[in-house]
Image: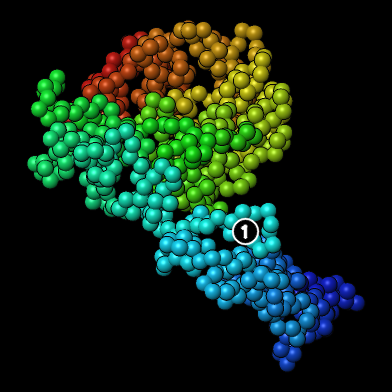
Amino acid sequence: MRRLVQLGLLLAALALCACEADEPSSTAAVDADVVADALDVGDVSAEAGVPDRCCPAGVCPFGEVCLEGACHPQPGQYGCFVDGECEDGQRCDDSVVCTCEDASCKPATGICRWPGDCCNSDADCSGSDVCAAGVCRPLPADLGCWHEGNCAAGQVCEGVVACPCGDGDCVSEEGHCSLPGLCCLTDAECGDGGLCLESRCVARPSGGQCFSDADCSGATVCAGAYLCPCNSASCIIPSTPGACVAPDEACCVSGSDCPQPSLCVAGAACEPAPGGNMCYLDAHCGAGRECVGATICECDELCPTGASVAGTCRTVATQCQTDDDCGLGLTCVIRDQAWCPGKPNPVNGVCVEAMDTGCWTADDCKGDERCTGEVICTDPAGCEQTNSPGVCNPYPMAGDCCDSHLDCEPGMECRNSNTTVTCPPTVTAVCLPVPKYGEDCWNYLDCPVGQACNKAWICPCNGRCGKSHEGWCGSMDGQGCHANVDCGSGYTCSRDEECLLNPCFSTSECPTSGTCKSNLTGQCWSNSSCPSGQYCEGLRVCPTDTTCNDPDKPGVCSPLKEVGECCDSYKACEAGARCISAVTGTGCVLDVSSICAPYVQFNITCFSDNDCEPSRECIGAELCACGLSGCDTSPVAGTCTLK
């Protein structure tokens, strides 16, 4: 980029000299000093050896930054050139920042340091104290920490509040060494209501539940508890608490007491290990799910069902505003689809399982990425399908499919093609540039009240059509629309319905917009304007994405045509009949020969070979063309016969 800027300046200098030449045909000589001044790098001769570090456009090669108009090496993790690159309260010492013009200057990175009596390393502290945020603090015991240097390799320091040196209003709190991600090292990582067992956080048992005999009182034992180690993919069921029961009342204590591969369910029964979406207890379903319809027949008890019945797992849609509203192992997320342009930011989310990988929303991705493929249950009645995270992918290009406004990069919105509703996006939605209100538009909502969006065309998601193009805001009459509501009172949204009804076209190939037309007494601009049992005969509407030689023409509401009568529209025939060309025997293109004919059964009855498989042909069809003199036989379908 820097070379392109320099080249542009050089060409400008050449052009300037040529323009100022005395004779148009003379060759202008360019002085070396003029070129050097244009490039703003001083003497450009090889002997000068001046480094080319200027960055007038603020752009430097990869690995460098632009400061004072000159490129400097990118400082490392702890390096700096200015105080702003350091933590609050630190200053950048020993840095050398060069200007563009100073050829003798050699840039040097400094180091971020705490000033005055603050410490900058453990060596500045006495005894075993450690330096954290410029303050000497006692070395924490056990797995406590002030920074990750107090923890073992691969561990992180969580929950620490190390007040900066000189901040008298802050209260410091010692952290704890932890495993990164969802796996745990100590109970401290699991909060007040959790325990770290097998490196996994589990809810602290209560109400007669347990994970070991130590959780039980008196002479009772813990029966039916199972622990699934963190990051293990081989567990039959997730970590499940057992029940505290008297030894002589327990049907089983562990799976080893049951026939394999059965489980000991809460010490009450030995049952086959549930697979797929089956369960006996809520814990068998995992975080954020519940077991519905299970019946457990306890040992030596009369059971109404005769045997235990496995239930099914169902995802619970628990509303939340913060993570505190969710249980252990769950996090509160607001679905990307809940964000609508121009609307207040949503505050209500749902609880989903916390994950180390994947994404629930765009917040889990980098700034230039979106979250795709996530499944989040929001139905208050719950969902059979489990919540599952998506993956982070780059922003889509303009015209690509989207299901959230957060899917699109800044300056773009996720717009539906077949509705005036901008939010929420539907299956037709694609990313499109945000229009200028009152000027450009995709629908009437982008225009002031009383105006319509003229000639807007949105090619739907995965549609086989051309590029979308914006419309413009204008008066109602003759303007673009998607529905009658776009046009206001006294107008009708007239659309090319023939394209949508053509049996040989895909609806994705047809324009989704129409044109606002003034209502006319005794005439119609759409079939929907006519009473039941009638259609708009003679209506002609030019598709919004094409140019037609003939002007649009209103029709007249007329009764639907019977079989054998002439027709000029796919809407013209009575129920059970379709309008087809007598010349071609198909409805792909209507012409002056078109008549209403009965529907056929593909590859059985027919009016043309197109109604049959390629291996068959249509035999015996009788079809009189509209207006053909002497032919008044009612249409008779033929039979698809092997060739």
**What residue is rendered at 42% in x and 62% in y?**
142
Residue 144 location, x and y as percent?
47, 60
Residue 579 shows in the view: yes
**What residue is rendered at 44% in x and 44% in y?**
192
Q: In this view, does 442 lie above or below 72?
A: above
Quadrant housing residue 629: top left
137 and 478: which is toward the camera: 137
Q: In this view, does 110 lie above or below 562?
A: below
**What residue is rendered at 63% in x and 46% in y?**
411
Q: Mark 1 points at which residue?
A: 163
Q: Is residue 353 left or right of residue 276?
A: right
Q: What kind of residue is marked 1?
A: Cys
Residue 579 location, x and y as percent?
41, 19
**What residue is rendered at 53% in x and 62% in y?**
146
Helix, strand, or loop for circle 1?
Answer: loop
Residue 368 location, x and y as percent?
55, 53
Residue 281 location, x and y as percent?
26, 34
Q: Is residue 400 left or right of residue 213?
A: right
Q: Is residue 110 left or right of residue 362?
A: right
Q: Is residue 269 above or below residue 98?
A: above
285 and 221: which is toward the camera: 221
- Classify the position of the N terminus by image quarter: bottom right
In the orientation shown, which residue stands out farthest toward the right?
Answer: 22
- Classify the position of the C terminus by image quarter: top left
Q: How crowded is mark 1: few (under 14 residues within 10 Å), some or many (20 or more)?
A: some
Residue 59 shows in the view: no
